[in-house]
Image (cartoon, rainbow, N blue to C red):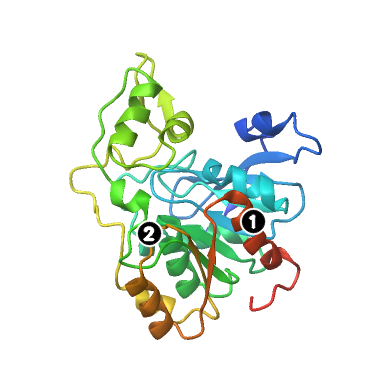
Amino acid sequence: MTTTTTATTTANTPTSSAAEEFAGLPNAPVIQRRWVTVATGGHVGGVFWHTQKPTVVLLHDAGLSARSWDDVLLALDRPAVALDLPGHGRSSWRGRGDYRPRRLASTLEETVRSFAPGGVPVVGVGFGGLAAIALKAKFPRSAGRLVLIDVLPGASSPGLRLWPEPSPEFATRGEAAAWLEERGATDPARTAELETEQAADGTWSWRHHLGSLPADAPTALDDETLWEQLATAQAPLLIRTEGGPLDAVSLDRFRGQVPDGDIVTVHADPQSLADVLRPLTQPNPEGA
């Protein structure tokens, strides 16, 4: 006999640090953190913007969390939920440390079905984009239009180039920021502020699992074979930022292997990204 476990949302928490950070703004949005317990074990967290049902789901890059979407969601000003991917932010770690995109699809489907039912668009940047491809391919009805930002299979984002990476503990968050900067991370100071936590002995380490994976954990988070799954998505949208990691070869491959897809090039700033995403958050976005 097969037993199906349904994801259950826990109580809302209106005291997220995002809510505190933006509380002083005129017409400040209501921001809440929620969790869902999933059948694959543990829980997945999400940061909800506004109180209505989310019109879009956002997935972050490797080594980041839901909070990396703050500026985009502030500019977007639409009901949305940004997830902490498994092993990141406030979501549970996996004991074996297996965070390959295909392994996350079932967990993400449960989470999306609980947090944002109805097939809303799923937007992913970097590693989150690869996870979104796997989700859309395996559960096409649970996820709406697939939107990728600066990522294609085999074309590594800044997060995928950096993580997984064995990391020391740090005496201060400033040391963590310097460690990130040496490795070419984007916005190392804010990343260190959001993605580190202090232990009882005063040292700082990453909230995510990618800095301290088990020795036998899979470490290849990119997956070239996701091209086949990407080609099955209906009208996927690829957002390329000026100066971003996608080169002409990758873009040509997308045009050739995903003829149903669209490409938009924008400035690499939150307002420009929000302007592209806003039409997709309408009740019946074109191409969804």
Q: For mark 1, does the 10 Å Cα neighbourhood hold few (<14), some (14 to 19), or many (20 or more) residues?
A: some
Per the image, label 2 sits on a secondary structure element best described as loop
Does residue 15 appear anywhere in the picture? no
Q: Position of residue 116 (x, y in %)?
A: 65, 59
Residue 286 lies, with reference to residue 101, above or below; the image says below
Q: Residue at 43% across / 81% down in the picture? A: 255
Residue 45 percent across, percent down from the top left:
54, 44
Check the picture and name the quadrant holding the N terminus.
bottom left
Q: Report which residue position mark 2 lands on.
A: 245
The residues tagged by marks 1 and 2 sit, at their Cα atoms, a distance apart of 19 Å
- Which residue in the rendered view is the most extreme toward the right? 27
Which residue occupies the foreground of this view, 243 or 131? 243
Give the quadrant of residue 279: bottom right
Total number of numbered discs in the rendering: 2
Amino acid tagged 1: Ala
In this rendering, is residue 223 above or below 176?
Answer: below
Q: Residue at x 38, y 22 (%)?
A: 174
Where is residue 204? Give x, y as percent. 36, 23
Numbered circle sitting on residue 199: none
**Disc nearer the start of the sequence (1/2):** 2
Q: Is residue 49 left or right of residue 204?
A: right
Q: State the image coordinates of residue 224 (x, y, percent, origin top left).
A: 29, 70
Q: Nearer the viewer, residue 232 or 126?
A: 126
Residue at 67%, 28% in the rendered image: 20
Whether residue 167 sits left or right of residue 271 in the image: it is: left
Q: Are marks 1 and 2 in contact (CB under 8 Å)?
A: no
| Residue 185 in sight in this render | yes
- Where residue 218 sits, quadrant-wise, is bottom left
Mark 2 nearby-residue class (10 Å; few <14, some 14–19, many ≥20): some
Q: Which mark is residue 274?
A: 1
Mark 2: amino acid? Pro
User: Tag 1's secondary structure?
Assistant: helix
